[in-house]
Image (cartoon, rainbow, N blue to C red):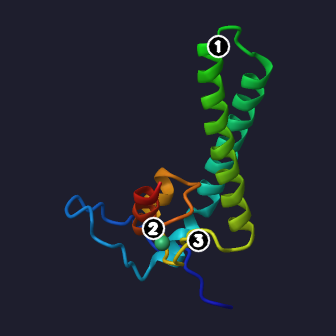
Amino acid sequence: MRWNLHGLPPRFPDVRSSSPAEPAADPDRPCALRGHLPALRAALVQQRRFRREQLAELRARVPADPAQQEVADTLRKGASVALIGIEAALERMDRDRYGDCVTCGTPIPLERLEILPAVAVCMACQRAQDAVS
Ligand SMILES: [Zn+2]
């Protein structure tokens, strides 16, 4: 009979309200992330469905007004980019690479993943990217 961790009281990470720029170097993180993967995957699958429906709708109904066409075009591009990001995140999950920054390899804080499940880069790389584009 092996030890198992069932029966331990559930513990939730403390919500730290101070110093938002503090790097999250949490030694418990790999376990914490694993526990959250099903929920994150479910969120990604839901987002993928939403984006696919949105794209189908945008393709089905092309507005006659050129100004509205431009808006629809912008929406379509945004939805396509989002869908590609979501699919890439699901693929990283399948390869067990999910949660690590694709640029520098640093673990992305769980709080960031929960807000943006499809995010591929850490805050530092995101800022560097935003500065370039
Ligand atoms: Zn990074």
Quick one: label 2, few (<14), some, or many (20+) residues within 10 Å?
A: some
Residue drawn at 74 percent across, 16 percent down: 62
Rendered view: 121 above or below 74: below
Say which residue appears at 75% left-offset and 16% top-offset. Answer: 61
Mark 2 → mark 1, Cα distance in angstroms: 37 Å
- Which secondary structure lies at badge 2? helix
Q: Which mark is residue 125?
A: 2
Residue 3 location (% of width, % of height): 60, 88
- Judging depth in this view, the residue of 133 and 94 nearest the camera is 133
- Mark 3 is surrounded, within 10 Å at the Cα level, by few (under 14), some (14 to 19) or many (20 or more) other residues, namely some
With 75 as the anchor, is 63 left or right in this view?
right
Q: Position of residue 81 (x, y in %)?
A: 65, 45
Does the beta carbon at disc 2 come under 8 Å from ligand 1? yes
Residue holding disc 3: 102
Q: Residues within 10 Å of mark 1 (few under 14, many from 20)?
A: few
**Left or right: 7 with respect to 78?**
left
The front one of 32 and 107 is 107
Quadrant containing the N terminus in the rendered view: bottom right
Query: Could you tell me how far apart the alpha carbons at marks 3 and 1 are, in whole angstroms?
Result: 38 Å
